[in-house]
Image: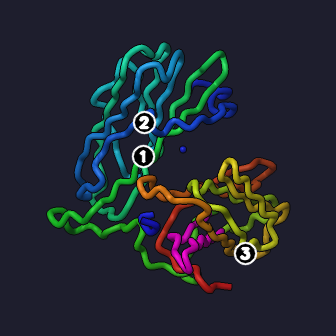
Amino acid sequence: MFLRIILLSVVLINNCFAINNEQNILISSPKEVKAGGNFLLIVSIPANLLSGITKVELELPNGFNAKVRKTGNAEFKFTNQKASFQWLKFPESEDVKVSLDITTPTNYEGYYVIKAKALYFKNSEPVKVSIQPQIITLIENKDQSNSKLIINDKTAITFNSFKSEGVACIRQVPYIKNEEIFVNLLVSKGHFNKYGKIQEKIPTGYRVANIKSHNAIFIYNDKQQILKYMWMNMPDKEKFIVSYKLIPNEAINDSVPFLIFGSFFYAENNDTKLVEIVERGIDLENIE
């Protein structure tokens, strides 16, 4: 489990508050798909949950393509790997289902995460509804042969061999040691030396202990399950590692996927930019 182991308006997107409704909006999709194959993804929204101006958005992994099958009378768009359904007035008194035909890339293998969220207004206040992410495992399709395989979670790279075109941040696939889960993050910052921040949202049921911060300020919000590493001036090294561990603090629900989502923020020309943290089979243990 551990090894398989985010345009209504700018105001709506940036100022919405989150409520926990994973059990209300459901996504149906297969757990495994042959690389290069197609599958049907269905989003089911129960009556009286959403209302008014509403947007449901799914973020697909790179290489995945989506065509709408059922819109539920919404306007549909698919751009920049985001499939969105938007209603000017959501049909709140009835159950709604929307669906997509999704095509997977032929030369990928491993697990991939589909993230989703819903945005709407309640009592004139913007609301963000979280939807449980879906994990799709692409398995090798021997009928589709000759192109070089790109493997999401097994690629054998090391700290010394890693080279980045631009800024990047990689999370080693979390591993278990003495009933604790260890997380290593490799930052490749290039020539940027000023402000930097790592922000990760961890699964519920764990508390966090910092291991290696590289002189960053470490902050953990246990209510939001968010941890941060913050630098006013980043280390001089072009690439470095920060590490933390997750310690179970209650009974873990094995039916909930173990997923960590994170971003790395940095300053360029007085603007703050970010790159998404990607998880890869890189060996960062016992480095530095």
Predominant secondary structure, magenta span: strand
Is 270 on the left-hand or right-hand side of 205? right
C-alpha distance separating marks 3 and 2: 38 Å
- Asked which quadrant contains residue 137, the reply is bottom left
C-alpha distance separating marks 1 and 2: 8 Å
**Kind of residue sitting beneath label 2:** Ala
Between disc 3 and disc 2, whose residue precedes? 2
Q: Position of residue 39 (x, y in %)?
A: 25, 45
User: Above or below — where is 117 with respect to 60?
Assistant: above
Q: Position of residue 183 (x, y in %)?
A: 59, 70
Q: Quadrant of the N terminus?
A: bottom left
Q: Residue at x 51, y 59 (%)?
A: 252
Q: Which residue is mark 3?
A: 212
User: Counting other residues with Cα less than 10 Å from the Cα at mark 1, is it few (<14), some (14-19), or many (20 or more)?
Assistant: many
- Asked which quadrant contains residue 186, the reply is bottom right
Q: What number is the disc on residue 83? A: 2
Residues shaded magenta: 168-187
Camera-side residue of 20 and 138: 20
The label nearer to you, 3 versus 1, is 3
Q: Residue at x 80, y 67 (%)?
A: 216
Farthest front residue in view? 251
Q: Which residue is mark 1?
A: 60
User: Above or below — where is 164 with respect to 283?
Assistant: above
**Kind of residue sitting beneath label 1:** Leu
- Asked which quadrant contains residue 8, the reply is top right
